[in-house]
Amino acid sequence: MLDDFVVRALVAGIGLAGVAGPLGCFLVWRRMAYFGDSMAHAALLGIALSLLTGINLLAGVFGAAVLVALALLFLQRNRTLSSDVLLGILSHATLATGLVLLALMPDVRIDLLGFLFGDILAVSRFDIFLVYGLGAAILGTLILMWRPLLAATLDRDLAAAEGLNPDRSNLVLLLLLAIMVALAMKLVGVLLITSLLIIPAATARRLSVSPEQMALLAALSGMLAVSGGVLGSLTWDIPTGPAIVVSALMLFLFSLLLRQRGTERPERKLP
Amino acid sequence: MTRLSPDRDDLLVRGRNIGVRDGNTWRVRHVDISVSRGEIVTLLGPNGSGKSTIAKVISGILAADEGEMERRPGLTLGYAPQKFNIDWTFPLTPRRLLCLTRSHSAGEIRDALEMVDAAHLLDAPVQHLSGGEFQRVSLARAMISTPDLLVLDEPVQGVDFAGQSALYQLIGKVRDNIGCGVLLISHDLHVVMAQTDKVVCLNGHVCCSGTPADMMNNRQFAEMFGPDPSHTLAIYHHQHDHAHGPDGTILAPDSSAATKAAGKANSDAG
């Protein structure tokens, strides 16, 4: 069954979306959408560096994403520039440096568009194995650390005071994001990774009354978006990565039509 | 961090000569403070006086740069932050919030919310709660796991006077019910909780500490604080023997007058 490239694309994409949904919820809750973007853009620098040094591509991208995230956290602490400025600088500086480095390596011929926009139809059996292996590790960590992660997201001091070690939670979240970026790069590309994290989570928000429900619905809506995108790209012969994002967007727009849950106030009981 | 021996009185935490640095300057220094079981300690001081910093050191959120912090082994802590920054995108109800750091049965959650008079808010989105409602829910969350020590950072902030009185009453009730120690932080320099056993007034160091004097015979205050406030509010008389400069530096008792006089002499000369 996995011989068919469409089936492989669907299987890999659905697996990825299942992980991206819950992880993306944390980005949304912590207002870290652009943070995720910067990590993803650093992936291109990671590609260039791993081609230069000959280390594994996945490891290079993971390393670059972690480095950029740590640099951001460090710079934010110094508070000389506001974080949106820092994000803007790091995000585009890493992307541009990556592009420049790649151009300076004349012997290396790579499919740049493939890295920028992904090529989910070129997914191999090994990629599927990676997505499900590392995906299971990410989800497992999320489930194991769910309580400390939520507490650290809501209030750092509270988590620290009640013994849930928020600094560790934040570091773990950062590492999980870096793995996610490395995994998603081939499937949706550097420029579209964040959309797979953010849009399904935003869609799920309108339908959820608890964080757990939101994480679950984000996973489901991401899976639906991937399926719609892959099938749509085959039907209308459009690029698959963007098709997935557009399909996620349509789900989000549809969710706007539904009545928002978890925001209505109970009626005040008058005497 | 040293451990207090469990048999020594009812002492929960004790800080001796605590100091926290902010770069090269001391944010707060030379602070002695302790909280025992069943004791309510109010930590007060103006903005920037270091009261939140000391509360964070006691709660284990922040490490002291100087001094010694002792803590009863296995101490459990309930913490109510000054303000939650809960994003609109975070779907959260009091039912779920009360299980944030530990899981509790539906009955325990209901009991805790009932105790703070917020049972009707069980499934309300937290973003919709009023200031007072949220403070009550936050108090319920901090005390639901019956901790040894409750640390409440400005629990009455953003709550009207009558509400403040009710909240103080509640905090007293919680203390009586679960027998915990309470560390309460307040920026109100004059009105403290009547059940307060000890007041520590902070401004970069401990300015003064003691028990709040009962001034509630005053009829006008009684009218201001609503029905029977004498059980919930008290006036604390500060006994400072010194003054602070604008940057928080300590001026000796008569040096402030002396500097003023010197400054005046200079300007007269010029």
Image (cartoon, coloured by chain):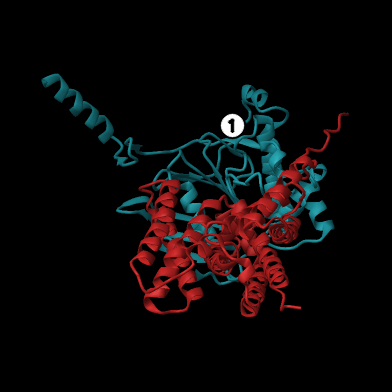
**Left or right of residue B229: residue A179:** left
* Letter of the red chain: A
SS at mark 1? loop
* Letter of the cyan chain: B
Question: Residue at the location (26% across, 30% down)?
Answer: B257
Quarter assignment of residue A162: bottom right
Question: Residue at the location (38% across, 56% down)?
Answer: A93
> Mark 1: which amino acid?
Met
Residue B88 at what x, y percent from top left? Answer: 65, 44
Residue B208 at what x, y percent from top left? Answer: 44, 44
Question: Residue at the location (71% across, 48% down)?
Answer: A250
Residue B258 at what x, y percent from top left? Answer: 23, 31
Q: Which residue lies furthest to the right in this view?
A: A271
Q: Is residue A161 visible?
A: no
Residue B238 at what x, y percent from top left? Answer: 46, 37
Q: Which residue lies furthest to the left in this view?
A: B269
Q: Which chain carries label 1?
A: B
Q: Is the C terminus of chain B in the top left, top right, bottom left or bottom right quadrant?
A: top left
CA neighbours of label 1 inside 10 A, class few (<14), some (14 to 19), many (20+): some
Quarter assignment of residue B133: top right
Q: Label 1, on which residue?
A: B215
In the rendered view, would you say B53 is above or below B148? above
